[in-house]
Amino acid sequence: SNFLKEMNARSVWHPMAHPADSQQNPPTIVTGAQGVRITDVDGHEVVDGVGGLWNVNLGFSCEPVKAAIAAQLDRLPYYSIFRGTTNDCVIELAEELRDFFAPDGLSRAFYTSGGSDSVETALRLARQYHKVKGEPGRIKYLSLKKGYHGTHTGGASVNGNANFRTQYEPLLPGCYHIPAPYTYRNPFNETDPEKLAQLCLQALEDEIAFQGAGTIAAMIMEPVLGAGGVIPPHESFMPGVREICSKHGILLIADEVITAFGRTGSWTGSRHWGVQPDLMCTAKAITNGYFPFGAVMISDAVAEVFEKDESGRAAIGHGYTYSGHPVGAAAALACLAETKRLNVKDNAAARGAELHEGLKSLQADLDLIGDVRGGHGLMCAMELVSDRATKAPIDKARINQVQEVAYQSGAMVRVSGPNIILSPPLVLTSDDAQVILSALRAGFDSL
Ligand code: PMP
């Protein structure tokens, strides 16, 4: 295991980490995974409280998915779906997705190879939609502060966290970030979720008025903000955004890379709030981690604008070699069938409520847990502070210690800035949830 750690330090450049990090803090080397548990190179086994990276909804031992991938590799391992060719798998999957997303008003699938690709595709489709409609001046994008939309240049430009933007500037011009409905910290010092939602909606209206509605292509948002620290808005917020976007002819892009397929306790985050977006970005759990894959789901109304385009140029010039990869599509078909058969959304809601309650009990005992967020399926977070009154963030060494001791005590949890985030597989049991909670308690007790 030491040899692997040495090779890692000299050869692997880890995403989202400083190059020196992997030398100073060698990462956990995962060598196996079964059910909801992962095993490391030293033979230590823990419950995966991170669910891969918000994506392993069905756990790691999904036999029907493995079988579907193996069969597909034998039959047709790859062919492109560029002009002139397609494959049977992606057609069948598109029909299944159309059925799954019908309550969201979405009927067409544009295939991608992952979440960042889905975001980029949606941003491009939005601009192109307005061009085809005869409004080429609609080129700007709106998004939420603390929103996360992947790492491509368009996605980075709409990311709400400046840390993911400033080091890569200049990015896309014309991207504006609206205050998020984040009750624990916000520019209005408003702690009432409903009042805060109204203030954020007003800020959105103000930004649109300032920019001029006719210059804006789309608003992109996560129905429950994920990587920014699990921030569920008040129930009035997303419907309010939908109404404002419709009023001004701005497309609403729901970034559901994390939330689609049951994580929030509903089949999609948008449905959770009773909203139909114009475009929806999906990836991650669409293949449960078995294959890099994604799809942007498109409404009839948006699709028709492209389909009736007389210039013949609509939607030409965008797509990926691995768009609609048949092995990914076979994996996605099997995942969708399992997702529905196991009805994972209901387990996500029940286990999510248990985890959320458990975190609130921890907070009652521990001053350094400033805020606990969750209550919408299996997405929970704790924001740690060094002082509850001033809300000064906890220092990095202490939060890392909580994570490390929690790992030694039986659960992988994720640290993101001052937050500890939980996004375990949706097939978690109550016993697994208790393992995560007691591992966290051990982590805090060690401080
Ligand atoms: N959008 C959201 C909401 C995400 O959480 C992520 C990844 N965490 C992405 C986009 C980017 O997805 P990927 O890492 O698959 O490119």
Image: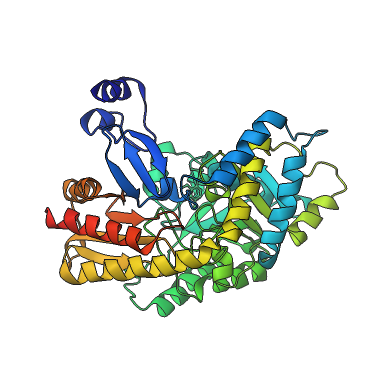
Q: Is residue 222 above or below residue 415?
A: below
279 or 266, nearer to the observer: 266
> Would you identify the image quadrant in which residue 329 lies?
top right
Q: Which residue is depicted at the point 43% across and 67% down?
A: 232
388 or 436, nearer to the observer: 436
Q: Is residue 249 above or below residue 41?
A: below
Image quarter of the N terminus: top left
Q: Which residue is depicted at the point 16% across and 69% down?
A: 365
Q: Is residue 7 left or right of residue 112?
A: left
* Color encoding of the figure: rainbow
> Would you identify the image quadrant in which residue 246 lies?
bottom right
The x, y position of residue 45, in whole percent, is 30, 43
Q: Is residue 13 above or below residue 401?
A: above
Q: Can the viewer see residue 234?
A: yes
Image quarter of the C terminus: bottom left
Q: Residue furthest right?
A: 310
330 or 184, nearer to the observer: 330
The x, y position of residue 208, in whole percent, is 56, 64
418 or 220, nearer to the observer: 418
Q: Is residue 75 left or right of residue 447?
A: right
Count of marks placed on residues: 0
Q: Is residue 442 above or below residue 151?
A: below
Q: Which residue is depicted at the point 62% across and 34% down?
A: 70
Q: Can the viewer see residue 207?
A: no
The x, y position of residue 268, in whole percent, is 57, 63
Q: Is residue 29 left or right of residue 349?
A: left
The x, y position of residue 334, in whole percent, is 62, 48
